Amino acid sequence: EVISSFTQGLIEVCEGQSLDTDFELRKNVSLSEYIVMIKKKTAAMAEMCCRIGALLGGGTRTQVNAMGNYGLNLGIAFQIQDDLLDIIADEKEFGKTIGGDLVEGKKTFLFLKALEKSYGEDRKKLLKVIEKKGIRRNQVSGYKMIYEKLGVLDDARREIKGYTQKALRSINSLNEENKKIFKWLADSLIYRTS
């Protein structure tokens, strides 16, 4: 079961990476496609680790599945948080250049949500990111203002909170001591600044 979980996790990560690469070449990517990609690329690894940990720890089938669901949902929240930090974090704390995803023309949760909600001039500016495969660094603050105006930063925060709560609900069958550890882990990943 451990080897099977490991193999399945690796397959998912490879499929997710392939989707991510495909999205770079495609002009149209939906938000639901993006969620599928991060489920595979990022969340599948967390799911695999949690599932294997539960298996090696002698967990019941219910506990193994609970831990897998915990890892999957926490992994999705983690990636959306990463997308959010890319635009709002303190650059020194974050350890990466702020707005790097926009500069590289990546189709992140924030970008796709903004595209979904935009119209007029804002929509034209967002479509230029796709057309030109990115923006210049000095344009990042203008795009951040579009995100703020459209409310996508708050949308991302709601999604992060929703997936985190889903992760925590999935471990209700664990004892209080274990739930406390996994709540701490969720908080440390989701409320991180770097």
Image (cartoon, rainbow, N blue to C red):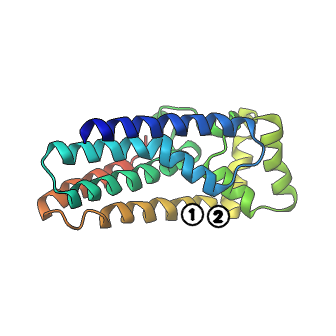
Q: How many marks?
A: 2
Tell me which residue sits at (68%, 33%) in the image. 104
Task: Using residue 144 as the reference point, say whether residue 78 is left or right of it.
Answer: left
Task: Using residue 101 as the reference point, say whether residue 43 is left or right of it.
Answer: left
Tell me which residue sits at (31%, 39%) in the image. 4
**Quadrant into which the N terminus falls:** top left
**Quadrant into which the C terminus falls:** top left
Question: In the rendering, which numbered label is found on residue 154?
Answer: 1
- Residue 174 % position (x, y): 17, 62
The reply to whether the C-beta atoms of the residues labelled 1 and 2 are less than 8 Å apart is yes
Question: In the rendering, which numbered label is found on residue 88?
Answer: none
Above or below: residue 81 compared with residue 19: below
- Residue 29 % position (x, y): 71, 49
Q: Amino acid at mark 2?
A: Gly
Residue count near mark 2 (Cα–Cα under 10 Å), binned few <14, some 14–19, many ≥20: some
Q: Amino acid at mark 1?
A: Asp
Location of residue 45 by image quarter: top left
Location of residue 167 by image quarter: bottom left
- Residue 121 % position (x, y): 87, 56
Question: In the rendering, which numbered label is found on residue 151?
Answer: 2
Location of residue 139 by image quarter: top right
Q: SS class of the residue under badge 1?
A: helix
Task: Using residue 188 as the reference point, say whether residue 73 is left or right of it.
Answer: right
